[in-house]
């Protein structure tokens, strides 16, 4: 009897050991596959990060160089947070406009963290990463990229914009950054597989990365993005206030021609500027949604931005939507500007900086 009991216990232990080994094997196999996926698909190297933030840099690689460039007693460091309009101004026109300017005896230096298609949530994450050390001023210019988020049925809307796959992935990295930065990649693979399964089953819908889905354009009339925009921009302002960094916040300038038609958005009379023909409306408004819904959202967003104008962190609020004339001389499409437009944009954006400085250098 005792021998049979002993044999049974031994057999049970073997089954448990086999089960444990099988589980370990599966876990290791998943992790190995995940390591390959993360390396080749996401450019995440094996192992952890020195600062524990490689996951964020995989989304915003520009921050690594900016972090190294910020600081110095002889420079007045300005961080630009926004989308393609601020990015284009900073990269093409901004540095020329500040090349001879100084603030309190220090040369003005622009750090362009703005990028095309990025929203206020991207800007908040970038500001959190960079912190306030070495930064003398934030310039925040956001609005239109939030508009596209509204083109989705209400049951699939997420306040954190995770109904974009980009922000859903960011949510993954934020939630599991500890494990990911210790070198584990299986959370990434399992999350992506779950994301794929939800998409294929129709349980989860994402806003397309290019053109909005035609069948969802009707939902863009509900400007749910206003609350998200306010929360993200307020987050930047509170971060700036804690770090004692002033902020120049601006409303968003836009222009919609009265006779605008997507099927005929090329200009009838080409406008020549600096030897280059600007013969078309660069991007159709439909890239962000139905034109009337886009205009409605931009107006709603400007009301949100204006409501934050008296936040303690604000150095000055720039009413850009009232400062740039609504005409084809200044706009290439609903939000991007011509050379003349960008020069005026820069003058208005930078004027609070120099107006509040004791020394602004050559004009």
Image (cartoon, helix red, strand yellow):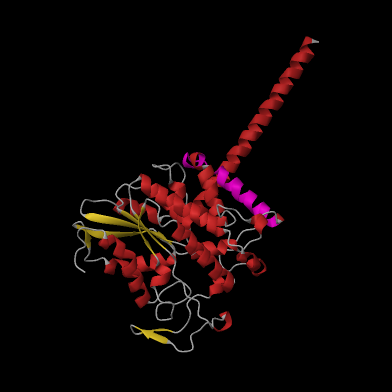
Please indicate whether residue 227 sits to the left or right of residue 238 in the image: right
Which one is in front, 129 or 340? 340
Q: Is residue 212 above or below residue 182?
A: below
Compared with 43, 295 (above or below) is below
Query: Which residue is found at the position 43% from the left and 80% from the top?
Result: 327
| Picture residue at 41% right of the left edge, 71% below the top | 322
Q: Which residues are magenta?
A: 179-200
In this picture, residue 121 sits left or right of residue 207: left
- Residue 36: image location, x then y, percent: 53, 49
- Compared to residue 325, the image places residue 78 above or below, namely above
Q: What residue is at 44 percent from the left and 41 percent from the top?
A: 48
Where residue 359 sits, quadrant-wise, is: bottom left
The answer to whether residue 161 is left or right of residue 198 is left
Say which quadrant the C terminus sits in: bottom left
Image location (x, y in percent) of residue 124: 44, 52
Quadrant occupied by the N terminus: top right
Above/below status of 14 relative to 329: above
| Residue at the right extreme, as displayed | 1
Magenta highlight on residue 181: yes
Instruction: Indicate the position of residue 109 as horizontal and vertical percent values.
Output: 27, 59
- The residue lying furthest to the bottom in this view is 269
Asked whether, in this view, residue 8 is left or right of residue 362, the answer is: right
Q: Is any atom of residue 108 visible in this view?
A: yes
Q: Nearer the viewer, residue 48 or 161?
A: 161
- Residue at the spot 65% in from the left edge and 56% down from the top edge: 156
Look at the magenta stretch and give its main secondary structure. Answer: helix
């Amino acid at each position: 009897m005792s021998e049979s009991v002993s044999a049974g216990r031994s057999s049970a232990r073997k089954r448990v050991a086999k089960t444990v080994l099988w589980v370990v094997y599966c876990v290791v196999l998943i992790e190995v596959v995940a390591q390959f996926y993360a390396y080749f698909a996401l450019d995440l190297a094996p192992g952890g990060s020195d600062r524990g933030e490689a996951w964020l840099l995989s989304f915003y690689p520009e921050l690594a160089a900016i972090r190294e460039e910020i600081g110095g007693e002889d420079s007045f460091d300005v961080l630009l947070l926004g989308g393609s309009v601020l990015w284009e101004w900073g990269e093409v026109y901004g540095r020329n406009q500040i090349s001879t300017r100084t603030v309190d005896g220090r040369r003005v230096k622009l750090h362009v963290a703005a990028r095309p298609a990025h929203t206020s949530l991207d800007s908040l994450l970038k500001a959190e990463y960079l912190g306030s050390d070495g930064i003398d001023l934030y310039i925040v210019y956001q609005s239109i990229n939030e508009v596209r988020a509204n083109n989705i049925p209400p049951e699939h809307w997420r306040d954190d914009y995770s109904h974009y796959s980009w922000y859903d992935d960011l949510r993954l990295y934020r939630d599991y950054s500890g494990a990911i930065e210790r070198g584990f990649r299986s959370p990434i693979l399992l999350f992506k597989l779950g994301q794929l399964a939800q998409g294929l089953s129709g349980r989860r819908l994402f806003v397309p990365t290019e053109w909005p889905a035609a069948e969802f354009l009707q939902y863009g009339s509900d400007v749910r993005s206003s609350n998200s925009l306010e929360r993200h921009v307020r987050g930047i302002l509170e971060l700036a206030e804690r770090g004692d960094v002033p902020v120049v916040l601006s409303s968003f300038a836009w222009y919609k021609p009265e006779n605008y038609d997507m099927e005929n958005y090329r200009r009838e009379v080409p406008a020549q500027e600096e030897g280059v023909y600007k013969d078309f409306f660069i991007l159709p408004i439909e890239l962000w949604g139905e034109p009337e819904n886009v205009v409605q959202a931009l107006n709603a967003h400007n009301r949100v931005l204006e409501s934050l104008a008296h936040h303690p962190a604000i150095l000055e609020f720039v009413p850009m939507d009232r400062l740039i004339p609504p005409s084809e001389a200044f706009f290439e499409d609903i939000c991007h500007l011509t050379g003349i437009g960008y020069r005026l944009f820069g003058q208005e954006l930078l004027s609070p900086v120099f107006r509040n400085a004791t020394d602004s250098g050559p004009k």
